[in-house]
Image (spheres, helix red, strand yellow):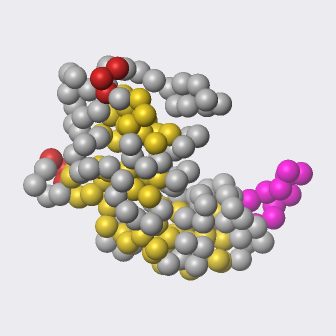
Amino acid sequence: DTELCGYIDKDGERVIPMIYDAAAPFREEAAYVVKDGLAGYIDKDGNDIIDFTLKPETNKYVDNSFYGGLAIAQDSSGKYGYIDKNGDFVIPAKYKEANPFIGEAAFVVRENQNYLNGYGSSFLMNRDGERLTPLWQYGRYSGEYMREGLIRALSTYGPSLSESIVILNKDGAEVIPSSLNIKYLSSFNEGYA
């Protein structure tokens, strides 16, 4: 038997049938779901709002929820981009990895077949798809997203004994520089890290 997913309300009543292979929580009135091997989005009444044409996510750590009207999605080639609530790629699917736009900017990784596992450069990008930081300047801090207008990044691209944490603002400028040689720093919350 295959286990299927659906949704219940706070009283435990089933409100959306158990017909999905995978189902994520609702965010901005939409939920990422997988059915019959394809991904799409539904509303809180179970109506399809983005057709099931997207490649399903296989990395359980990727958050395909909408943030500020944009969500990470894979096209048929498996590359990541960002879709709007119409299902249109407003930032083209050309990245090996992508983080959600929680805030004004997100890290993406561009593919490069000249490097191990095809990993290329990571950089901070704004909601218009414009690169904010130089290629190869910073490493992506896994799972990090913009908080209070700031984001953690690694001072070097790739493992290094001299690697430290830097904090970048929404424009990609260092506000806490690598010269402080910080090895661990939590995310900012209420002005403190």
In the image, what residue occupies the spot 34% across and 58% down? 131
Quarter of the figure with residue 23: bottom right
In the image, what residue occupies the spot 26% across and 26% down? 163
Q: Quadrant of the C terminus?
A: top right
Tell me where residue 62 appears, x and y as whole percent. Answer: 47, 51
Please identify the dominant SS of the magenta region.
strand
Quick check: is 141 in the magenta stretch? no
Tell me where residue 96 appears, x and y as whole percent. Answer: 31, 58
Quarter of the figure with residue 84: bottom right
In the image, 182 versus 110, the foreground residue is: 182
Residue 149 visible in this rendered orientation of the protein = yes
In the image, what residue occupies the spot 35% across and 29% down? 177
Quarter of the figure with residue 138: top left
Residue 59 visible in this rendered orientation of the protein = no
In the picture provided, is 31 more to the left or to the right than 15? left
Tell me where residue 97 appears, x and y as whole percent. Answer: 35, 54
Quick check: is 18 in the magenta stretch? yes
Tell me where residue 6 appears, x and y as whole percent. Answer: 70, 61
> How many marks on residues?
0
In the picture provided, is 126 more to the left or to the right than 2? left
In the picture provided, is 188 more to the left or to the right than 8? left
Q: Quadrant of the N terminus?
A: bottom right
Q: Is residue 4 above or below residue 160?
A: below
Q: Is residue 24 above or below residue 159?
A: below
The residue furthest right is 11
In the image, what residue occupies the spot 64% across and 63% down? 31
State which region is magenta. Answer: 4-19
